[in-house]
Image (spheres, rainbow, N blue to C red):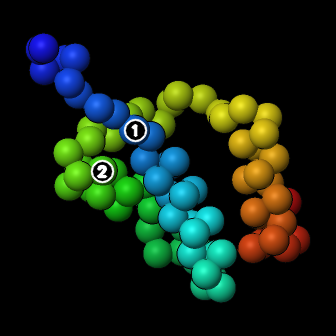
Amino acid sequence: MSDVDTTETFNPWSVVNLVFHHLAEQGLHPVLGETGDPAAAAADLLTAMGIQPGPDSAGPGTADVQETLAQLRRTMMPGIE
C-alpha cells in the first residue's frame, strides 16, 4: 500500500464540535473564539495522533448537523443568532 492509500484525514472543526459538545454535556462552559482559533489546536491534536488535518473547505454539514449546531449555539450562547 502506498503512503497516499494510508494517509487518514479528518476535519479539525469536527474535532472542535465533538470536544465542545462533550464539555458542554459535562456541565462545563466552553467558549469559541475568545482565546484564539480552536481549529489550530484541533489540527495539532490530530497531527499528534497521526491523522492529517483535512481542509476546512469541505463545506457545511448535512441539514441534521447544521440543526444540531444551531441548537447547541442556542443552548450555549443565547441571543447570538
Viewer-proximal residue, 7 or 78? 7
Q: Find the residue positioned furthest to the front.
A: 1
* Residue 18 place in picture, x, y as percent: 54, 58
Query: Image point 50% across, 30% down: which residue?
Result: 57
- Image marks 1 and 2: residues in contact by CB distance under 8 Å: yes
Instruction: Tell me if 10 is positioned left or right of 44 in this view.
Output: right
Between 55 and 34, the one lying in front of the other is: 55
Q: CA distance from mark 1 to mark 2?
A: 8 Å
| Identity, as a three-letter code, of the amino acid under mark 1 | Phe
Is residue 32 in sight in this rendering?
Answer: no
- Residue for badge 1: 10
Q: Residue at x 47, y 53 (%)?
A: 15
The residue that label 2 is drawn on is 46
Q: Residue at x 43, y 47 (%)?
A: 12
The front one of 42 and 79 is 42
As shown in the figure, which amino acid type bears the numbered disc 2? Leu
Residue, x 65% and y 85% (percent of image)?
27
- Residue 38 drawn above or below residue 7: below
